[in-house]
Image (tube, rainbow, N blue to C red):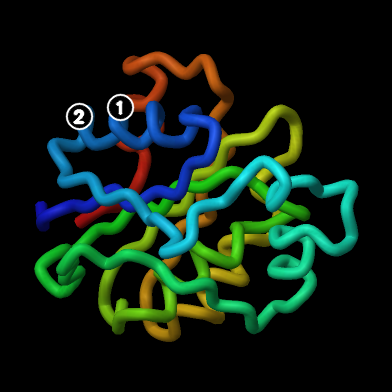
Amino acid sequence: MGKKLVAYFSVSGVTARIAREIASVEQADCFEIRPEKPYTKEDLDYTNKQSRSTLEMSDLNCRPAIVTDGLDPDGYDVIFVGFPIWWGREPSVVDTFLTAWDFSGKKIVPFCTSGGSGIGKTAERIQSLTGSACVDAGKRLGGEVCEEDLKLWTAGLELE
């Protein structure tokens, strides 16, 4: 089994907690996808058509700058990518991560957190962003997921 990375974007801390649990279950490294300019409460106001997140999500080509902290995904074979669902898909800041490196030949396993929205066609979008990576269908994980459930989920993935 190859080396694994759990890369995640989290605003409320829910995705971060689940990402750390997956990293523990999978004995993987963890990397937080952080925007260079952190989001404020006003930035995240989805009811405001001029808020930063609304404008970013309205532009499918938007790539907010991220802090890379010297990350080199080349050394990883499997990359779990976690995020909250925004406007029915992964946030634009996650797209920045997915287009910043060449993920050819890597297995990408998306997971999302949401109060109710599913992962939808996010895997198809991620596939279009990462080219020849092998992208799993992914999974929506609720805020109350236990270690045993994570083990059952990851055991069912083809990670080799």
**Residue 60 vertical position relative to residue 17 in the rendered view, above or below:** below
150 in relation to 92, above or below: above
Amino acid type of disc 1? Glu
The picture places residue 64, in percent across and down from the top left corner, at 53, 72
- Tag 1 secondary structure: helix
Residue 51 x, y percent position in the rendering: 78, 58
Left/right placement of residue 67 relative to residue 30 reads right
Quadrant position of residue 75: bottom left
Label 2: few (<14), some or many (≥20) within 10 Å? some
Task: Give the residue at mark 2.
Answer: 24
Q: Which mark is residue 21?
A: 1
Please state which amino acid type lies under the numbered disc 2.
Ser
In the rendered structure, are the residues bearing label 2 and label 1 in contact, judged by CB atoms less than 8 Å apart? yes
**Residue drawn at x 13%, y 37% as measured from the top left:** 27
Could you tell me residue 149's position as x and y percent? 41, 20
Q: Classify residue 111 as left or right of residue 149.
A: right
Q: Would residue 16 appear left or right of 39 to someone viewing this image?
A: left
Q: Locate residue 26, reporting x and y percent.
A: 20, 36
Q: Nearer the viewer, residue 101 or 53?
A: 53
Residue 76 higher or lower than 148, as above or below = below
